[in-house]
Amino acid sequence: MTATLITNIGELTTNVERGGDPTGVLRDAAVLIEGSRIVWVGASADAETHLLRRDAAPQTPSREGSDVSRSGSDVHRVDAGVNPSTPGGNPTPGETASVHRDSGYRPHSRGTDAVSREKGGAGTDVIDAGGRAVVPGFVDSHTHLVFGGDRADEFEARMTGTPYAAGGIRRTVAATRAASDEELRARLAGFVAELHGQGTTTFEVKTGYGLSVHDEARLARLAAEVTPEVTFLGAHVVPAEYSERRDEYVDLVVGDMLRACAPHSRWVDVFCERGAFTADESRRILAAGVAHGLLPRVHGNQLGPGDGVRLAVAAGAASVDHCTYLDDDDVAALAGSDTVATLLPGVEFSTRQPYPDARRLIDAGVTVALASDCNPGSSFTSSMPLMIALAVREMGMTPSEAVWAATAGGARALRRDDVGVIAPGRRADLVLLDAPTRVHLAYRPGVPLIDRVFKDGVALV
Ligand code: NIG
Ligand code: FE
C-alpha cells in the first residue's frame, strides 16, 4: 500500500477540537497517509523518530495503534519547495530517513511544480512541506454544475442596476435541455478539474436545470458519475410550459420525476422562495423525497424573508442554504436544531445583495457552513478560497471560523464524518497551501495559493 508522510507542516488545521480551538491547529506537524486514509497525525519531530526507528529495524511491527507497519528502509524524501528540475529535489544518499528540517516557511517560485515525488514500490514518500500550512480539503456542499449555456449578459446588466430574479433559471433550463449528454459531461468534467485545482475534494451537485422527467433524470445520472452527493432539485422553479398549471408541475415532481431521479440521488431540495415554491408546496415535495429515501435540504431566505428556514428545521433538513434574510425566530429555530446554515457569499457578490450575517448566527450557536453555489445565474464561481475571503471581509467571520465552515462545516451540511477533518481513520483529503498560515486564504484574495491537493491519498494537483 502506498504511504506518504507530509512533514514540516508549519500550521496544520485538523478540525479536531483542542483546548477550546475547534480547528485544532498544530504547529510543526506531520501527517501520515496509507492508501486512501490518514493513519497518523503528530509532531514533525516524532515523525522523524518514527521513520528513523523503522529505518534501523525495517520489519518491526508498529507499537502505535493508529499506525500501520511498513518497510522503513524504502523512504524517499521530497521537498515541497524545490523545483523538480533541479538535482536538489531528489533524495540524497545517507539522508533518506532524515525528514525533519526547520519549519520556517519557504515560498517557492511561481510557474514551477512545487513538489517532486519519488515513487518506490511499497515504500514511503516523504513530502517536506517547507513550513506550509495544510488544511482539510474543502467541502463544497452546494453546487449546480450540470447545465448548458451562459448568462454573462445578466451579470453585466446587474452590475448596472438590474436586480437578480429567479426567472433567469428558465434560460438555463432551455440551454440545458438542448445540450447533449456528451456536452454536459465534458463541461462537468471541466468544473470538477476546476474544483480540485482550488482545493475542493468533496462536492455536492444538484439537478434543477432539466425540469422534465427525462432531463432531470439525465442530470441526476450525469451528476452521479462525479459525486455521491447528488441532490434532486426538480423543484427549482416551475418551468415555462407549466406556468399556468403549477399544481400539475408539483404533482409531476413528487410523482414520476422523483421516481426517475431518486435512484441516482442522496438528497431532495426545494427552492422555497417567492417566485419559486410556496411553503406548502415545499413541505409536500420534501416529504415525498423523504418517502423515497432521500434526505432533505432547502434553498431558503435568499431573496427576502420567508418560510424556508423554519420549514427546513421542521423537516429535519441537514442544511438550509442562503439564509440571507433572517428574523430572530429563524435564528432561534436554527440554534435549537441540527440544521446547518449554509451561507453562499458568491451569490451576494454576484447579485449585489447584502451579505448574510454570519456573526449573528455563530454568536447564537448556529452551525455555519460556506459553499460556492456555483451556477450560471447567481454565483458563477467554484472557488472556496473566495468564499472564505468574502466571509471574513464581509460577513464577520474570523479566518479560523471561515476555514472551519468551508471544511468541517460543509461536511456537517452533507452529514459526512469521513471528510472535513484531518485525523486517523478519516479520508486523506488535504490541501497544502503555498502560505505559512490559512489566514492567507483571506489575506491574499484572488491569489492562487493551492499548492498540492490530495484526495483519498492521491495527489490530484
Ligand atoms: O442557488 N436559488 C436558486 N437557485 C440558484 C440560482 C440559479 C440560477 O439563477 O440559475 C441559487 O442561487
Ligand atoms: Fe443554489
Image (cartoon, rainbow, N blue to C red):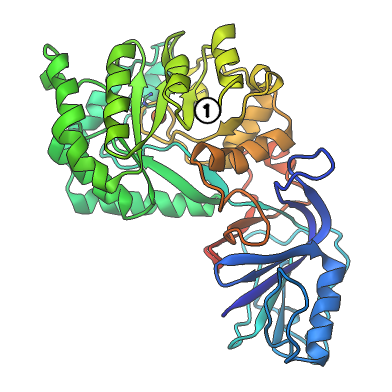
In the figure, residue 295 lies in which quadrant? top left
Seen in the picture, residue 143 relative to 181 is either above or below; the reply is above
Q: Is residue 428 left or right of residue 248?
A: right
* SS for callout 1: loop
Provide residue 248's location: percent of width, then percent of height.
12, 19
Q: Residue at x 16, y 15 (%)?
A: 246
Closer to the camera, 94 or 142?
A: 142
Provide residue 70's location: percent of width, then percent of height.
67, 84
In the figure, residue 261 lies in which quadrant? top left
Provide residue 68's location: percent of width, then percent of height.
67, 76
According to the picture, the residue beneath numbered tag 1 turns out to be 339
Amino acid type of the residue tagged 1 in the rendering: Thr
Estimate how packed mark 1 is, as few (under 14), some (14 to 19) or many (20 or more) residues with alpha carbons within 10 Å.
many
Closer to the camera, 245 or 188?
A: 245
Closer to the camera, 83 or 58?
A: 58
Q: Is residue 233 visible?
A: no
Q: Is residue 21 left or right of residue 373?
A: right
Provide residue 348's location: percent of width, then percent of height.
51, 21
Q: Residue at x 72, y 48 (%)?
A: 16
Q: Residue at x 73, y 90 (%)?
A: 73
Closer to the camera, 435 or 246?
A: 246
